[in-house]
Image (cartoon, rainbow, N blue to C red):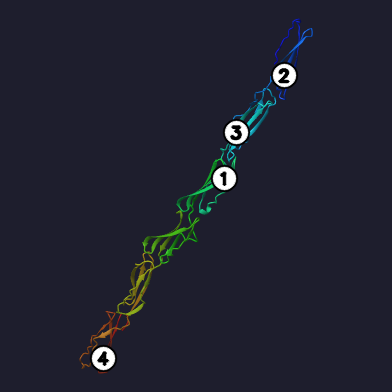
Amino acid sequence: VFSTPSASDACDSQVSLTYVDSSDLDECGLGTVTRTWTATDCAGNSSSASQMITIEDTTAPVISGVGDDFTMECSEPVVFSTPSASDACDSQVSLTYVDSSDLDECGLGTVTRTWTATDCAGNSSSASQTITLEDTTAPVFVGDLPTNLNVQCDGDVPAAAVLTATDNCSDATVEFTEVITPGDCPGKYLVTRTWTATDCAGNSVSHTQKINVEDTIAPTFVGQLPPSSLTVECDNIPTPEVLTAIDNCGTATVIFFEAIIPGDCEGSYTIDRLWKATDDCKNFTIHKQIITVIDTTAPVISGVGEDFTVECPTEASFSSPMATDNCESEVSLTYVDSSDLDECGLGTVTRTWTATDCSGNASSASQTITIEDTTAPVFSGVGEAYTVECPTEAVFSMPSAADTCDNEVSVTYVDSSDLDECGLGTVTRTWTATDCAGNS
């Protein structure tokens, strides 16, 4: 701003005062501006005076709108603020920037943008914004993850899955570990599988799969099993079968048990049989068989003699048989005698033996003896033939008769004579002894 001079003249009260401006400015409008005033009076006398103003610019531009430093996740785009620059003298300030970074191998760290504002006079100012890149986000597994499982056997455990992972900022590596925790039997344990995905910044995520291996299925017997119940004769008890079993996870051991429950008789009882198949984890299955042992077979009587005939008075002696049983060691052997005799005591005598075992089975056998009498009585006391002188009386003897079987033999006699007319000759007495059987 130039001064405002005035002009005065000794003679002229109204001096004319004019001025002319001249400048010596560069492209920035800086340099000198000179104002020359000329005062002229009425007589044409004039004088001049000048004022020079030098225009300079020593003030740097001002940068505004630079954002604050901040921290952001590495996966987001880096967006700096958009500042502007203004200058007291220059309406078209040059605003440039340079980016610099201090990043590690993971691409994390700081990125700095430095803006420089320069006016036409070369005055400049700078401002910076620093963005810190960090990675706090763990990787993410790709696809479906293995789930917890409950399986029966070793062979049911699936192969470990091969997992991959992605990360928002870098590649991710996946490490796999497997730990087996034993249980209380070979077929029971826990498989713990862990996949850990780690990114370059050390952020990690883990997925754990637990596979519980436990054999809960009992073994199975092979082939046809013995019938659950069976009734047999005491001498026809089947030999215990040798059973085998298979298991879904391994081998099975079969143990056989047998218990005999006595009954009322030696040949009547119960056999309880049990087969138990057990696997390595003590899962088991059993098969029971109950055998009812009975005795329906009658004892056998041996040593019974043939029927025969005896001559009276020989004593009728029966045989002495014995009885055996297929089941019982002690058999009751009794007998009953019956007779079919006539009044002479002749006929048949029968002995019937009955053998009975403890179960009430019985058999009988008989022997019949026929008693006969074929022997005639025997006389005794029959006198000799003799001669008497007439008139002596002819006196016969008084014989008697005995019989082996009959104590009361009938004795009769018949007299016959062979005499001449003089009454002389022979007189004969004939005795006849007859027993009860008619033998005479």
Residue 298, percent from left and from top? 39, 68
Q: What amino acid does circle 2 point to?
A: Val
Position of 50 relative to 189 (above/below): above
Q: Earlier in the sequence, mark 4 or mark 1?
A: 1
Residue 4: image quadrant is top right
Q: Is residue 101 visible?
A: yes
Residue 150, percent from left and from top? 51, 49
Q: Determine the secondary structure under disc 1.
A: strand
**In the rendered view, does 396 fall on the left or right side of 372?**
left
Q: What amino acid does circle 1 point to?
A: Thr
Report the residue at 74% width, 18% height from top.
Answer: 22
Which label belongs to residue 162?
none
Q: Are marks 2 and 1 in contact (CB under 8 Å)?
A: no
Q: Which residue in the structure is indicated by mark 2?
A: 33
Q: Which residue in the structure is indicated by mark 3?
A: 131
Q: Determine the secondary structure under disc 2.
A: strand
Assign the N terminus to one quadrant of the image: top right
Q: Earlier in the sequence, mark 2 or mark 1?
A: 2
Q: Which residue in the structure is indicated by mark 4?
A: 427
Badge 1 crowding class, 10 Å Cα cut-off, few under 14, some 14 to 19, many 20 or more, is some
Q: Earlier in the sequence, mark 3 or mark 4?
A: 3
Q: Are marks 1 and 3 in contact (CB under 8 Å)?
A: no
Q: What amino acid does circle 4 point to?
A: Val
Front of the two marks 4 and 1: 1
